Image (tube, grey):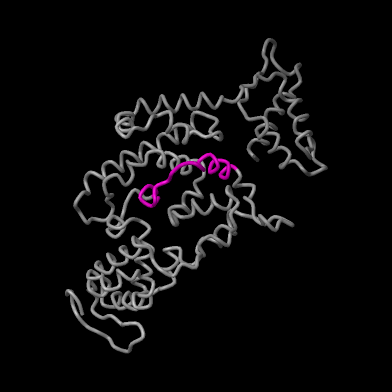
Amino acid sequence: AEEMVLGLDAVRTFMEIPEARLPNGLGLVFVISCDEVKVADALAKGRRQGDMPGTVFSQTDARHYLDRIFQFRLEIPPFPRNDMRQYAIKQLIELPGIESDLRSRSVSIDTLVDRMIHVGVHNPRNALQIVNAFAQAWWLAKKRETEEIGTERPGGLHEGAVTMHPISLGSLSAIKVNFPDFYRDLQNDPALLQCVTDVMVRGKPLQEQPIATRQLLAERYLRKRDGEADMPYEARPEHRALRQYLSSLIDLRWPDSLQSLLLLSEDPITRKFGSKATAIYASLVSGDKQGVLEGFGRHIDDVSTFKQDEGRLLLQMVEELRHETEARRTNASLVIADLVDYFPEDMSHLLFGSCVVNSMILPNSDAVIYGERSEGW
């Protein structure tokens, strides 16, 4: 903004040279390419001292000031949204392999671009940035899905982890380019996308969201409404464009987990059980019973029994404990002992029958049983 004001002052200096002082036949013409609205805003913010010449106090004053400088204007209208879509389609078609990859997954480029090139994309530069972000992520995901099959190396992806969800990847690419701060928060907590959508777009109560994300939502994305009991929160002004884009994705069927699409990599636990399991497993080996319950969403309902798939997931995690240290196995055994009543009745015997931890503290008992993998205790 300061450079804009100084630049205009320099132009005025030359324009105020008396004609008599210029050589015969010599004139000066300045051609300035600019966004006049932003220049006027810079003037309004930068010239508030009443004792300075050319004082500007408002946007109206700024336009009058510019009228004294610009004698002729050639205004370029904004690019139509459809042009940006067609431009993005053209760029995607020219990228090697993308169109055939999408066709093999029964996804049309038009459908993908409808999600990526939203109403906030006004110029070719922005459209190309989104297309390039998608292409880069797509090629890297294909390479990692193919080369890491059958390995336990960190960084790989299980087959289809990303490439089975091109529409979701395209939408996340648009978020990455146009809402980078939100994208970084998503990388730390993929569940934040659903939480922000629920509160900002669907109008669900903030109290229904996971405890870990409530504070982040209240601090960065939401503000309180005055006198509104039913919907006490709304999107902050700087996040209204984000709310608009998320509204356009309200009918999109996201994959169960976004972690693979956001990080383009998976640790062994994630690759085996899915990204939802990462936080649950971390809580399990840390001895954090409440964290395990929150991972399954048991902190917001009254259901005291795990679903069949949730019980199986914990059983599989118990199997993985053989790779952990003794301290972590002990932490996990304490949590499992506390949660045994949450398991369906037909799974309780499997829990103890397949346990491979060094020690298991049984509920309602002072006994500690030691053993290795066996058919039973």
Could you tell me residue 213's position as x and y percent?
51, 60
Residue 14 magenta-drawn?
no
Answer above or below: position of 260 versus 320: above
Quarter occupied by the C terminus: bottom left
Q: Residue at x 42, y 63 (%)?
A: 296
Q: Measured along the vertical axis of the image, is residue 131 above or below residue 374? A: above
Q: How many marks?
A: 0
Q: Residue furthest right?
A: 51
Q: Residue 111's x, y, as percent?
A: 43, 31
Which corner quadrant of the image does residue 152 belong to? bottom left
Residue 87 placement, left or right of 365: right
* Residue 275 falls left or right of residue 323: right
Give yes or no for residue 243 being in the magenta stretch.
yes
Quarter of the image that includes the N terminus: top right
Report the span colored magenta.
241-262
Q: Does 242 appear above or below 118?
A: below
**Going by the image, does 263 lie left or right of 219?**
left
Q: Residue at x 33, y 55 (%)?
A: 274
Residue closest to the far bottom = 366
Answer left or right for 101 relative to 297.
left
Position in image of residue 29 (x %, y %): 65, 18
Q: Residue furthest front?
A: 346
Task: Give the x, y percent position of residue 349.
Answer: 26, 73
Residue 308: quarter of image: bottom left
Name the one closer to the observer, 224 or 134. Answer: 224
Compared to residue 241, the image places residue 90 above or below, namely above
Residue appearing at x 41%, y 24% in the figure: 90
Q: Nearer the viewer, residue 364 or 166?
A: 364
Q: Residue at position x 31%, y 42% from top?
A: 140
